């Protein structure tokens, strides 16, 4: 038994001293709550989402977790839930922490910045600093930058506290059917033309081509519902029009000049886009709808992480294994014709997009230093596992980036250096057999790398504060857009209603000392 306060270094000295050799074979299947802990052993309980790339959960549960557990002598329990269930579970556990009760898990992986939970979590600053300095013989040098996207998604400038630790983000390019896009472009005359070969560059490209695509039976699919993907794409539209919920100093601006007219303009645009290029199903969108509708062949385009493309690749590989002719196989040709844009679509002011999901872990401040130290070491090693060479050396192969098939992008810039990311994407081991069979290029998903330059965060241009967190999880922005698109409210009325709700939320959190700004 340990007594008194311990540091993470004490933890490592104690539980690491007798650890088994790195790279030892897996001796345990996925952990469940039926596993009995050894006397005095630390148990680390983790809650996270069911990844959209199933191979990632298989690697995480059956390779990384068992081998990490064996190395440090820590029993690890992992529970997976659908992403839509995470916010409610996290809020309930935060309430238990505040009441001095066992929260149920020791840390949670969120998919948007969990700033409202700040009072119940540890300050992750030391962990971030230690991770930045981490090095490994298989990847010499430190981790590079903790990218701005991650910093603004985990740091509260009012309190000076890091309320979370981001290990990854998922880029959110537009997926589009190149065959359908080319046909729509060819139907447009010169004045209304779009980029036939390169796909959509601007939102007005999407509107112009979308009119024809809907007539062809393949509408545009962007959510207007109370779910995560709608939250993301509608903010991307606002940002591209030059408006946002708040400014850099956490003042509410979406209904204040000069932003008010920009917000009204983007509301009118989305109404037009819905009426001319979309379909009623977008009002019942779920986090899986963009995948499901696109993969069913109904949509001409959708915004999503690379999970859409990856399913088309898996379907194509199965068709090739069945012996289908790659030139005539619907599954193979569907994969060949699925492309992603290099940048977010541009609005009148700029080409701005968000991350698809923001992977942020938060560790509950329960006072149990042994468990907190274990959780921090787990996250440090999880980031180290991004690099396939490190993962191979530690027995964690193929590592986080490869296991996620390029879905999880590093927030510590050199966790997997750019050269290694590009080496993977340019000769994509998953798509390469399809490229060889069809004559297509193997670097199908290389464009996703550009998101390191253009992806913005929830709360841009200010921090992802507690008010932004509540606005996000109460879906005020999607409701505002949906009511205008459906013709229920005039843009002016919907904006005034949303701004009033948002300002009330900001004032509530200001009174608690967690949000800056004055208006």
Image (spheres, rainbow, N blue to C red):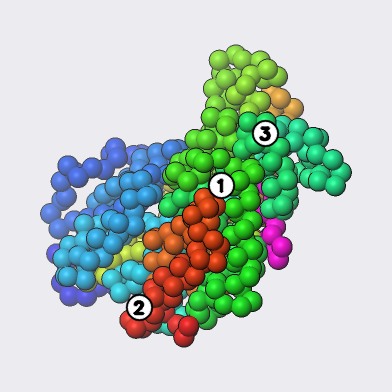
Residue drawn 70% across and 57% down?
346
Residue beneath disc 3: 215
Q: Position of residue 252 (x, y in %)?
A: 50, 76
Residue drawn 39% across and 75% down?
504
Earlier sequence position, callout 3 versus callout 2 = 3
The answer to whether residue 217 is magenta is no
Q: Quadrant of residue 219?
A: top right
- Asked whether the beta carbons under mark 1 and mark 2 sit within 8 Å of each other, the answer is no
Residue 366 lies, with reference to residue 271, above or below; the image says: below
Question: Residues in magenta?
Answer: 340-351
Mark 3 burial class by Cα count in 10 Å: few <14, some 14-19, many 20+? few
Earlier sequence position, callout 1 versus callout 2 = 1
Nearer to us of marks 3 and 1 is 3
How far apart marks 3 and 2 lie (CA) works out to: 47 Å
Q: Is residue 427 visible?
A: no
How far apart marks 1 and 2 lie (CA) works out to: 32 Å
Nearer to us of marks 3 and 2 is 3
The answer to whether residue 346 is magenta is yes
Question: Which element is circle 1 on?
Answer: loop
Residue drawn 21% across and 71% down?
98
Residue beneath disc 1: 222
Front in this rendered view, residue 389 or 197: 197
Mark 1 burial class by Cα count in 10 Å: few <14, some 14-19, many 20+? many
Front in this rendered view, residue 313 or 423: 313
Left or right side of 291 for 120: left
Residue beneath disc 2: 508
Q: Which mark is residue 503?
A: none
Please identify the residue farthest to the right as the structure is shown: 190
Q: Position of residue 251 (x, y in %)?
A: 50, 80
Q: Position of residue 144 (x, y in %)?
A: 57, 66
């Amino acid at each position: 038994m340990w007594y008194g306060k311990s540091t993470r270094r004490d933890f490592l000295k104690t539980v690491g001293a007798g650890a088994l050799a790195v790279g030892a074979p897996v001796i345990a299947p996925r952990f469940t709550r039926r596993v009995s802990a050894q006397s005095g052993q630390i148990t680390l309980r983790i809650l996270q989402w069911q990844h959209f790339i199933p191979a990632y959960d298989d690697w995480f549960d059956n390779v990384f977790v068992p081998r990490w557990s064996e190395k440090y002598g820590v029993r690890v329990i992992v529970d997976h839930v659908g992403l839509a269930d995470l916010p409610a579970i996290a809020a309930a556990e935060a309430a238990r922490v505040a009441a001095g009760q066992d929260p149920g898990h020791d840390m949670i992986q969120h998919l948007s910045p969990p700033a409202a939970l700040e009072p119940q979590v540890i300050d992750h600053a030391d962990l971030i600093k230690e991770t930045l300095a981490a090095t490994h013989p298989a990847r010499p040098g430190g981790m590079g930058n903790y990218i701005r996207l991650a910093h603004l998604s985990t740091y509260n400038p009012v309190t000076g506290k890091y309320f979370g630790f981001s290990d990854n983000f998922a880029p959110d390019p537009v997926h589009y059917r190149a065959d359908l896009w080319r046909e729509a472009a060819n139907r447009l005359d010169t004045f209304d033309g779009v980029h036939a070969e390169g796909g959509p560059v601007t939102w007005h490209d999407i509107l112009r081509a979308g009119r024809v695509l809907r007539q062809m039976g393949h509408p545009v699919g962007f959510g207007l519902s109370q779910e995560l993907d709608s939250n993301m794409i509608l903010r991307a539209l606002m940002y591209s029009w030059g408006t946002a919920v708040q400014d850099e100093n956490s003042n509410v601006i979406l209904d204040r000049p000069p932003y008010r007219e920009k917000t009204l303009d983007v509301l009118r645009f989305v109404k037009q886009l819905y009426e001319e290029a979309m379909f009623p199903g977008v009002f019942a969108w779920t986090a899986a709808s963009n995948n499901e509708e696109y993969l069913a062949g109904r949509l001409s385009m959708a915004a999503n992480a690379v999970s859409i493309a990856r399913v088309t690749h898996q379907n194509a590989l199965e068709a090739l294994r069945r012996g289908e002719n790659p030139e005539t196989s619907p599954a193979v040709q569907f994969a060949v014709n699925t492309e992603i844009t290099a940048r977010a679509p541009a609005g009148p002011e700029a080409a701005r997009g968000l991350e698809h999901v923001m992977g942020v872990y938060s560790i509950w401040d329960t006072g149990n230093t042994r468990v907190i130290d274990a959780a921090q070491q787990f996250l440090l090693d999880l980031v180290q596992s991004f690099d396939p060479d490190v993962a191979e050396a530690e027995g964690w192969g193929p590592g986080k980036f490869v296991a996620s098939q390029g879905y999880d992008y590093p927030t510590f810039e050199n966790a997997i250096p750019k050269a290694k990311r590009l080496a993977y994407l340019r000769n994509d081991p998953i798509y390469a057999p399809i490229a060889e069979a069809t004559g297509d290029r193997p670097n199908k998903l290389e464009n996703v790398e550009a998101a390191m330059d253009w992806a913005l965060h929830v709360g841009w241009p200010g921090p992802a504060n507690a008010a932004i967190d509540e606005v996000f999880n109460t879906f005020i922005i999607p409701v505002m857009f949906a009511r205008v698109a459906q013709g229920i409210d005039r843009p002016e009325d919907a904006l005034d209603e949303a701004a009033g709700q948002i300002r009330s939320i900001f004032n509530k959190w200001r009174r608690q000392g967690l949000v800056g700004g004055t208006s």
